[in-house]
Image: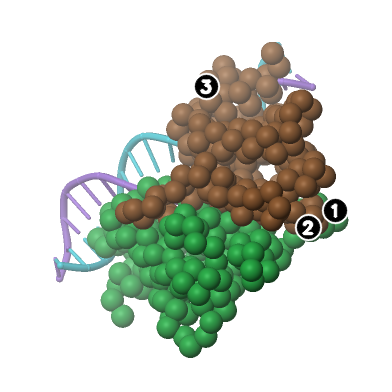
Chain colours: A green, B brown, C cyan, D purple
Amino acid sequence: MKTSERIIESAAALLDFGGVAAVTLRAVGLASGVSHNAPYKHFENRDALLGAVATRDFQKLAATFTAFGQERAKPLTKLKKALQAFSEYGRDYPNRYHLLFSNPDIAKQQGELQQAALASFSAFACLVADCQQTEALPPVPTPALAGLLYASVHGLIDLQASGRMKTEKGFMNVSEGIALLLKVLAPKGTR
Amino acid sequence: MKTSERIIESAAALLDFGGVAAVTLRAVGLASGVSHNAPYKHFENRDALLGAVATRDFQKLAATFTAFGQERAKPLTKLKKALQAFSEYGRDYPNRYHLLFSNPDIAKQQGELQQAALASFSAFACLVADCQQTEALPPVPTPALAGLLYASVHGLIDLQASGRMKTEKGFMNVSEGIALLLKVLAPKGTR
DNA sequence: ACCTGAACACCGTTCAAGT
DNA sequence: ACCTGAACACCGTTCAAGT
């Protein structure tokens, strides 16, 4: 295993375990068996290393979405599975999820990361387009509909994690939110 | 003006100007005319100070939502205005928005902050309930519907800020996303 | 080409001391 | 009650030096 890969692996592990603050170059170096500034030989700085972790996960996410698209099933079923996988990723790896989708310092990185992030969204948009073709979703412009779905599910995951919309009664979890969203999005005839 | 208020004011200004990383206790002390550890006499630590900034803004947000609710206008019009004000707050004060809605270290604070955050959501939910009463929104449980709307708009603001769903063509902005969402949410008869 | 160790400037936090 | 200044441990980053 290449040193740079080991460094990314260590950073991801530290991130999962202790949050982004735990990903110090000294801890990464120690966990990777190198000195605390060896990472600088592979990444421009700490943010670039975190960006590499995010890039790897975006590529995995895009692959997951693409894989769902190639399954033999109804488009709406495949979309639901993809959304569920997405929300489970957010629930099981909250620190990593936050790095990918809600970290301005990472988001501003152009290049490979930006490309991987857009590839993820594109793969997701394909699933939405398939649903539209079978009239399981309304015939509005695909990028707008895919964007709304992507944003809504992201918002549900993010607010759920932060507890910002919990009320005494009527608490809503991510799955219920997704179900409600798909229900109101279903074209008239199929409701 | 009390010292503690001056400290909060300075912290908010530093946050707006240079992001959360610029809010160092030394900079806050300097801007407030006190030493770099005077803040510890008013707040337990740096996160608690940032939490106080967030609390203040959540209270403002709740007041804004409540004020919209008391205007003389159609409920749906008032809700649209509130959503627009919300998204403008996110656009004009991105660092503050991120502190309130996407910062896990701040979100985990219980007490006054949690209370203010829930009060904001409650005020928003009232606007949604009014729309349901005039049948401008479907008769699903109010907390679920308000939660979905809140989360969706948050997701749109957050992803827009991070550029995570921009595609070459069909780019979607927050206003379009909100409009599309309200359109698909409108009950059958009123479409 | 890849890595190390010392050094620098900066930070959050603690603490004894001042009024 | 409120504040200060020194001190501590930690951090990202730089740089000269090693193989």
- Mark 3 near mark 2, Cβ–Cβ under 8 Å? no
The residue under the point 58% across, 60% down is A153
Of the residues shown, which amino acid type is indicated by label 1? Glu
**Residue at disc 2, secondary structure:** loop
Q: Residue at x 57, y 33 (%)?
A: B89
Question: Please, what secondary structure does the residue beneath circle 3 have?
Answer: helix
Residue A74 visible to the viewer? yes
Q: Residue at x 77, y 47 (%)?
A: B135
Snapshot quadrant of residue B128: top right
What residue did someone put label 1 on?
A168
Q: Is residue B56 left or right of residue B160?
A: right
Q: Position of residue B161 (x, y in %)?
A: 46, 44
- Cα gap from disc 3 to disc 2, whole angstroms: 52 Å
**Residue lying farthest to the right in this orientation:** A169
Mark 1 burial class by Cα count in 10 Å: few <14, some 14-19, many 20+: few
B70, C18: nearer the viewer: B70
Q: Chain of mark 1?
A: A
Cβ–Cβ below 8 Å for labels 2 and 1? no
Residue B115 location, x and y as percent?
Answer: 79, 42
Chain of the residue where label 2 is placed in the rendered structure: B
Relative to the observer, which residue lies in front, B173 or A169? Answer: B173
Q: Which residue is mark 3?
A: B30
In the image, A38: left or right of B104?
Answer: left
Within-10-Å neighbours for mark 2: few <14, some 14–19, many 20+? few
Query: Which residue in the structure is indicated by mark 2?
Result: B140
In the image, is residue A139 above or below residue B124? Answer: below
